[in-house]
Image (cartoon, rainbow, N blue to C red):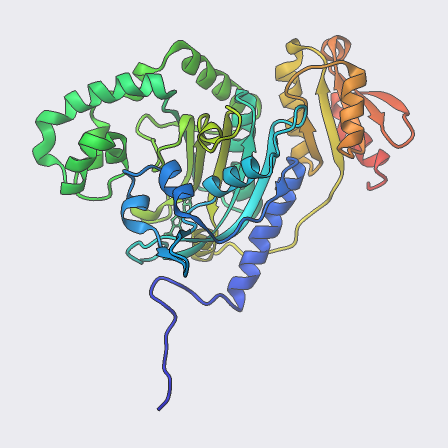
Amino acid sequence: MKLVINSPRGTADIYGEDIKYRDFINNAARTIFKIFNFNELITPAFEYTEVFSRSIGEETDIVQKEMYTFNDKKGRSLTLRPEGTAAVVRAAVEKKMFGSGNLPIKLFYIGNMFRYERPQKGRMREFWQLGVEALGSDNPVLDAEIIWMLNLIFKRLGFKNLVLLVNSIGCLKCRKSFIQEFKKYLEPKKAGLCGDCIKRLKNNPLRIFDCKVGGCAEIAQKGPKISGYLCSSCKTHFKDLTDALSSLSVDYKISDSLVRGFEYYTKTVFEIISNDLESAQNALGGGGRYDNLIGQFGGPELPAIGFAVGIDRTIMLMKDLGIGYGPDTKNIRAYLVSLNDECKGYMLEILRLLRDSGISCDINYTSRSMKAEIKKAEKLEFDIIAFLGEDELKNDSVTIKDLKDFKQYTVSKKEIVGKIFEIAGRI
Ligand code: AMP
């Protein structure tokens, strides 16, 4: 008898042109990860079940309905990873990556994920994601950088008609007061909600915003706005983030109803959507801040932020829109150091100039002495340091130190990119 077997429902064999698209996307993303100073982490395709159930949230659809969970031969409960963040945090805590002086830790991953969903165009049971996690800083500039990076990946791929949505869902305290009011608003409207959302109303009402059934999301959107319940520190954080996005010339739209599906998110959440995709599957990638997760895993109480991009969905949309695949660019490493807080806006301007030009570069998140920064830059093997201080701010200039021969140059903002390429010998 002949054995005739198909691949399991919701999975795909990837070959031919799709491999070319994947290579193009992964290479473009890897180039950008390098420019933003992120390093790769590969975690196992399965973890102990608690890694996901406790972090993503027992009340979420993913944990309740979509996980591939099984016992191994010794009866331990394992789960095929449904997402990347929990595993990255587990690995960072287990491997004690949080040394003093190296925060935030910037990691990226590319891997397959598994969710038992109803397969349809753009939604599969095994799919691929690439993502980043920056662990150990709550600086809103970092949020802005992460959002900028997400945007830049899609720009590099050739997308034009994309919308970047951002919102703040506040810290656990602000969310509590919002949820109280939100429940009060929904109680009398219960009859309009689907069965799942009636359950969600009790345990996890924010998920109602994400419901794809009937008019649930619409009812939620007409209710109170979480922005009205943010504490002053979360409000300031969000304002600083949006200011930084504006300094970086990243176009964004504030979306009051964006909450996203995982329970671990705090403060900033964001999503990049395409208006060319059917509404239910129009999100290409998204992410948010998760300031309590590292502590929950037994690590230090450190804040963090990350995003994930769906590779399969990105390929699908590129093909639909007639976007092709092509080659990618350069590689030079710079460390941008601001010597005082007044330079914050100026630093972002220079950072954008450098990264837009394909120069791999990172910044100091806390100002220290010039000597300490030089030491750090040498340890992290940067090629040059670009310093910004009082004089540089006044004169619209930058001081560049070549770490190979310790020569120093002060150049105008207009000349900086050219000078860096000259030093690196790669004009
Ligand atoms: P999430 O991890 O749910 O925030 O999803 C991040 C991105 O992964 C989404 O924007 C999609 O592009 C992609 N994605 C999520 N679930 C699936 C799925 N079942 N099939 C294909 N892509 C998915």
- Between 367 and 243, the one lying in front of the other is 367
The answer to whether 179 appears left or right of 356 in the picture is left
Q: Looking at the image, can residue 274 be seen?
A: no
The answer to whether 226 appears left or right of 33 in the picture is left
- Between 198 and 18, the one lying in front of the other is 198
- Residue name at image x 66 percent, y 24 percent: 100
Q: Position of residue 419 (x, y in %)?
A: 82, 30
Q: Indicate whether 307 appears above or below 11.
A: above
Q: Position of residue 184 (x, y in %)?
A: 15, 21
Position of the C terminus by quadrant: top right
Q: Position of residue 387 (x, y in %)?
A: 76, 19
- Residue name at image x 39 percent, y 63 percent: 11
Q: Looking at the image, can residue 295 be seen?
A: yes
- Residue name at image x 30 percent, y 15 percent: 228
Position of the N terminus by quadrant: bottom left
Numbered disc total:
0
Q: Indicate whether 60 appears above or below 372.
A: below
Q: Position of residue 129 (x, y in %)?
A: 48, 49
The answer to whether 127 appears left or right of 149 in the picture is left
Q: Residue 153, located in which quarter of the rendered image?
A: top right
Q: Give the residue furthest to the front.
A: 74
Q: Residue 255, located in which quarter of the rendered image?
A: top left
Q: Indicate whether 209 appears above or below 311.
A: above
- Residue name at image x 27 percent, y 49 percent: 65
Q: Residue 341, located in which quarter of the rendered image?
A: top right
